[in-house]
Amino acid sequence: MSTIAPSSSPPVAATRPASTRGLMARAVRAALAGTPGRLRLATAVSVVACLLFGVLSFVAATSRAAALSDAQTNTSQLVRIQSIRTNLVYADANLTNAFLVGGLEPAAARRAYEQGIGAASQGLAESAANPADAVVLAKVNAVVSRYTGLVETARSNNRLGYPLGAAYLRQATDLLRSDALPPLESLGRTEQERVNHAFDRSATATIWLTIGIVVALIVLIGVQIWLGAWTHRVFNPPLVAATVIVVIVSVVLSSVMVWSQSRARHTRDGAYFLTLELTTTRTDAFDAKSDESLTLINRGNGQVYEAAFQDLAANARVLLADAARRGGADAQAARQAFAAYRATHRQIRAEDDRGSWDQAVKQATGSSAADSNAVFGQFDTASAQALDQQVRRLHEDLRSARAPLTGLAWMALVLGVVAAGAAGAGVMRRLREYR
Amino acid sequence: MRPRTLVTVALGAVSLTIVTACGSGSTPPLPSAAPQATAAEPAAATAPPLPGCSDNNKTSVESFAPGGTLATLAADSATIRKIKRRGRLIVGVSADNLLFGYRNPLTGKLEGFDIDMAKAVAASIFGTATGHVEYVVENFAQRIPDLLAGRVDIVADIMTINCARWGQIDFSTEYYHAGQQVLVRKDAPFADIKQMKGLTVCTAQGSTGSENVKRFPQVKAIQVPDISDCMVRFQEGAVDGIFSDDTVLRGFAEQDPYAKLLPRKLTNEPYGLGMPERDPTFVRYVNALLAQMRNDGAWASIYRKWLGNPPSPPPAVYGRALP
């Protein structure tokens, strides 16, 4: 039976659509024939134009609100990821310092290491909530586990007085630098691209609004002119009402959109830019601090680490100078603290280059206020405060920039429907008169 | 737009810096990008061995005869004059070879047989070693480059005297006689390297072990930057054995109760202090000092301090012609 059905169905399938299509075409032609037809067409066009206006206004406002919200979320994620990296480098630098001193590690250095690892782990857990980054962060998390394992082996060897502990420490540091930091760096770059993309999307949202306004006004005014010429009446009140609604919504929504965009652009060039500068500065500075320890632990063969220090510190200095120029008192304090740290570093290098390695180590690892750790600690505090301030500013600015958008979007949609109703009623009135 | 570009550029520079810091990491003992073991490669860039020198007889350990007193030689040596002006002797040492050159984790200070040899050289120049020694911690592969670059005056780092190295640097007379062995797990079911078919054996880059292991094609040899990285891999179970000097391996075995040395001594490794080729008078000075230390018991007391009852010191062999 099943073989018959397919062979018999093609003629039916072939004739029916053709006849349906023919019928519909005939019906449409009849509906649009003559003056009533043209009026029906005008009705349809004005209704569609008003609805389109409502929908496009809605899309423009909501997509900007979403884009700005994305910019906020991704900036937070960017800052979180950079701070995971900073915390790992901080933990590692303190560990290296503890080994430099020899003997039982200083309790303060151990605490700092644990704080760094704790903060990094917490950051990893929080950031992994973002599904786009979860896979990479899970890998980083696994590397951090292996890292802490190697560190504990290093410590056990150290406690037994075995120099092998230093080899485990070196393995741990290498692992962190080769397997944990690069994925975090590339994730940071991805996050930055996402923020830029979100800001771009926010800017292009205006296009939808512009298209909606232009189409609606051209159609409404065109239909009124045509209707006026044909009926010899200048105004058609419902159509005028629809036009007024469209104009008012356009004016209100456009000005809010222009305001929110200028606010977004201001944030992108201001708070967001400073956030980037400050996170980069902190990453560079922490890397440099860790290079200071690595130069010393490589005793006489650490030239590459000192060269890396110089590059990082120079970069951080340029960024901090710019941030201080734009960013106010906190960034200025961070800049001064970093200059002080650089001076301390110069003293340490001078001691080591003069052959007083012990003296250099003392200053690099000591706990007095003039020693490297304390001086760098001041930079850490000041720059963290400055960064925090910019991130907060960014959130406030973007939140206020998108606050009115969602409400206005719904209002525009509803008023678009109302305008469509009015426009339809206006033309239909002429159609009824014609009958 | 301008500010954003600046940060992009700055971030680019940061990642570049990081890449540079890691990329050039193969030189210092803490290489960030090259921690991976590399398969053993054919002879690294070494100079051709010295003509008339053979590793199979005494010619390899022949050094320059002192031919003068410490005082006259010190006055004649440009290197010693420079060291005195500087106020300190710069010595290339290792920091991870227990008993020879290692950083004592409890004190943070460098200690060992080689460190005491270096101190003896400094003490003979300055009267006391205290405050007159600067250590440069090197891995094996850095010893010759550091000498050639003038970064160190002398290397005291369990360095084997051989003809290939005589082509690049000068050596003192022999001050310790070592040999190479293999370290394996205590429960390993073999008694000799020849039975370790297809197993992985670790050596350090730039060490004689990395060359000598090629005589045993039945094992798979890998190289790492630092010899102590071999021990980390061994403890992680990533390699089955370590091929190195007995001096190094005994230090490792002392830090790991689950390790032992295979009994057969596979090579002879005469240790000498390494110096640059440019000043044979400095080498003669060090040889005069070593001769004195062999006679007055200084060598024996250093030996006793680190290794126990001293045998008679390796004899000095002179006869190398001055350049």
Image (cartoon, rainbow, N blue to C red):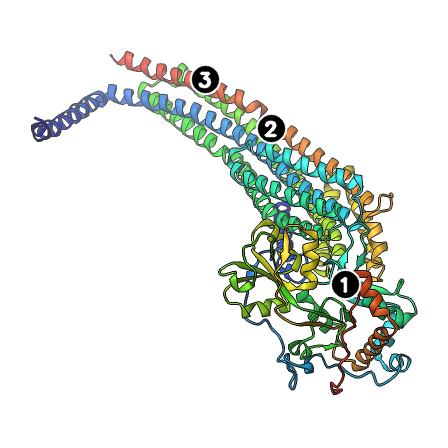
Q: Say the numbered circle drawn on residue A48.
A: none
Report, in whole angstroms, how far the alpha carbon at label 2 lies from the one at label 3.
22 Å
Q: In the picture, which quadrant includes the N terminus of chain B?
A: top right
Task: Look at 19% across and 21% down and name the residue there.
Answer: A27
Residue B184 placement (x, y as % from top left) = 60, 56
Amino acid type assigned to the residue bearing label 3 in the image: Val
Residues packed near mark 2 inside 10 Å, few (<14), some (14 to 19) or many (20 plus): many
Q: Secondary structure at mark 2?
A: helix
Residue B41 placement (x, y as % from top left) = 54, 67
Front residue of A434 and A255: A255
Q: Secondary structure at mark 1?
A: strand
- Indicate which disc, 2 or 3, sits on the residue closer to the N terminus: 2
> What residue is disc 2 on?
A401
Q: Is residue A54 left or right of residue A147?
A: left
> What residue is disc 3 on?
A414
The extreme right residue here reads B127
Amino acid type assigned to the residue bearing label 1 in the image: Val
Q: Is residue A39 left or right of residue B265?
A: left
Amino acid type assigned to the residue bearing label 2 in the image: Ala
> What residue is disc 1 on?
B136
